[in-house]
Image (cartoon, grey):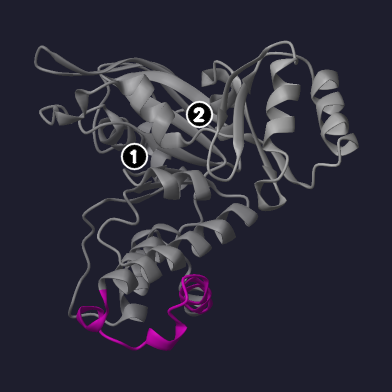
Amino acid sequence: MIRIENLTKYYGKFKAVDGLTLEIPEGSVFGFVGPNGAGKTTTMKIMTGLLSASGGKITIDGVDIIEHPEFIGDKVGYMPDFFGTYDNLRADEYLEFYAGMYKIPQNEVPQLVDDLLELVDLSEKKYAYVDSLSRGMKQRLCLARSLVHDPALLILDEPASGLDPRARFEMKEILKQLKTMGKTVIISSHILPELAEMCTHVGIIDHGVVKSSGSISEIMQNMQKERVFSVKTLGNAGFDTINMLLSELPYAENISVNTDEIVFSYRGDEDSLARLVKDIHDKGVPLLGFSEKQGNLEDVFMELTGDDENDENKK
């Protein structure tokens, strides 16, 4: 669906985006992750036509939008981190205004407005003035605005910024619906645990360069130097037995007996793990859980980007 090739952007002599190359699968919810000044917003603004690129290529649905920026309006919907609303308009009038800008046939506008308000759960606020809406409601109305022309690609810059927990939950539910509708969604956010919940794929960017990209599970597997397992038993019974079995298991290392679990790293094969589980059962140990511990997006982010997050001079 989307391919970015060798994208560069200079501000004078400063290179904000440095040969960025990235593929975003069609129908994915893609999280754009990076420290302040990493080049996320710059890249997204180039994709929306708000900034010109210094070099490179961005292909959306087979069209190079840098060479043919006139196609951006049809293909891309954009919700900035600081959005503008017209307080002297009602919610329905606000969407009607943008429908007119996109030249939606007048006879289709009433149904379109109703459908969009229902999608973002604002049907009851159809005739409410924009300035009477909460920040979360304004955020959802702005999302509806970006969908007026039914774009294939949605670019959302910090969509959960400044929202309370309930409003963030509502936004996540809407994003799930957009995915089921076949939309490709790009999200920029600093709230890494929420990105992990919302996104099917992520790209980690630093100093204008993609450090890693792919599905979250792929990134975790690529970054994980060793597999780590946890063993839990009923009332912590049999810990000594399990510790003994692990000490005899090839490639089991860094065995740690904690308060409620035994943790160990492992470099062996699946057959040996299966035999270990059988041996624990045969020894009469009341096994409650035997699971592989997964890393998290924050760990990967910190490992790939180092300690440069304090550099806020790049945008």
Can residue 165 be spotted in the picture?
yes
Q: Earlier in the sequence, mark 2 or mark 1?
A: 1
Q: Quadrant of the N terminus?
A: top right
Q: Determine the residue positioned at 59% across, 52% down.
A: 179
Q: Residue furthest front?
A: 240
Q: Secondary structure at mark 1?
A: loop
Region rendered in magenta: 111-134
Q: Determine the residue positioned at 50% across, 79% down.
A: 114
Return the x and y of residue 27 as percentages of the image width and height: 61, 43
- Whether 48 is drawn above or below 210: the answer is below
Q: Determine the residue positioned at 86% across, 29% down.
A: 279
* Magenta stretch contains residue 107: no
Front one among 83 and 77? 83
Can residue 65 be spotted in the picture?
no
Q: Determine the residue positioned at 25% across, 51% down.
A: 81
Q: Residues within 10 Å of mark 2 (few under 14, many from 20)?
A: some
Q: What amino acid type is highlighted by mark number 2?
A: Val
Q: Quadrant of the C terminus?
A: top left
Residue picked out by circle 2? 63
Q: Secondary structure at mark 2?
A: strand
Disc ID at residue 48: 1
Measured in 3D between alpha carbons, the distance from the residue under mark 2 to the one under mark 1, in whole angstroms, is 14 Å
